[in-house]
Image (tube, rainbow, N blue to C red):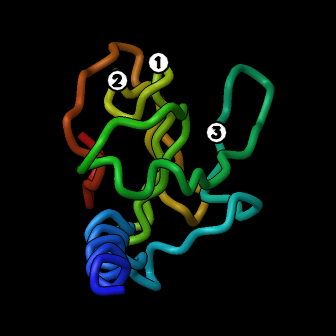
């Protein structure tokens, strides 16, 4: 009986250590929410939120679109990670800007365009 109690205690500790911390409310994004638009030639498209990228400063994820709810910026990356070359940056209010020359970025929150 003592052994079972000890094992239950150890498993409870492991679950507490391995469980992911709760997400902050401002980072709880919905994939169906649009975060901006982009223009290519005569085409106008929509950039969508990707909740998988919302903590991209902490770990790499497999995604091509990202939004930062702290400064309402959307970015579209060349690769399938959130830390590749940025080819698009725009504000959530519909403003947009394309970069002809791809610039590597290790961050994704800017208040002004470069």
Q: Quadrant of the C terminus?
A: top left
- In the figure, 79 relative to 51: above or below? above
* Marks 3, 2: nearer the viewer: 2
**Mark 3 element type:** strand
Q: Name the residue: 73% across, 45% down.
A: 46
Q: Which mark is residue 38?
A: 3
Q: Position of residue 65 (x, y in %)?
A: 55, 40
* Mark positioned earlier in the residue sequence (3 or 2): 3
Q: Residue at x 46, y 18 (%)?
A: 79
Residue that label 2 marks: 84
- Determine which residue is flagged by label 1: 79
The residue carrying pointer 3 sits among few (fewer than 14), some (14 to 19) or many (20 or more) residues within 10 Å by Cα, namely: some
Give how far apart the Cα atoms at labels 3 and 1 are: 17 Å
Looking at marks 1 and 2 on the same chain, the residue that comes earlier in the sequence is marked by 1
Measured as percent of width and height from the top left, residue 47 is found at 66, 46
Please tell me in which quadrant of the rendered image residue 36 appears.
bottom right
Q: From the image, which quarter does the N terminus lie in?
A: bottom left
**Residue visible at 55% across and 57% down?**
51
Q: In the image, is residue 42 above or below residue 114? A: above
On screen, residue 40 above or below 75? above
Which is in the foreground here, disc 3 or disc 1? 1
Q: Looking at the image, do the residues carrying marks 3 and 2 touch, with CB atoms under 8 Å apart?
A: no
The first of marks 3 and 1 along the sequence is 3
Q: CA distance from mark 1 to mark 2?
A: 6 Å
Q: Are marks 3 and 1 in contact (CB under 8 Å)?
A: no
- Mark 2 lies on a secondary structure that is loop
Asked if the residues shown at circle 1 and circle 2 are in contact, with their CB atoms under 8 angstroms apart, the answer is: yes
Q: Position of residue 37 (x, y in %)?
A: 66, 47
* Rendering coords of residue 10 (x, y %): 26, 73
Question: Tag 1, which secondary structure?
Answer: loop
Q: Residue at x 35, y 71 (%)?
A: 11
Marks 3 and 2, how far apart at CA: 18 Å
């Amino acid at each position: 009986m003592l052994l079972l109690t000890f094992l239950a205690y150890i498993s409870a500790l492991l679950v507490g250590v391995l469980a992911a911390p709760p997400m902050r409310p401002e980072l709880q994004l919905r994939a169906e929410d649009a975060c901006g638009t982009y223009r290519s030639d005569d085409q106008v498209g929509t950039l969508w939120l990707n909740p998988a990228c919302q903590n991209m400063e902490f770990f790499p994820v497999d995604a091509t679109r990202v939004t930062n709810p702290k400064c309402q910026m959307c970015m579209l990356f060349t690769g399938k990670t959130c830390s590749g070359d940025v080819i698009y940056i725009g504000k959530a209010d519909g403003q947009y800007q394309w970069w002809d020359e791809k610039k590597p970025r290790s961050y994704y929150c800017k208040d002004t365009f470069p």
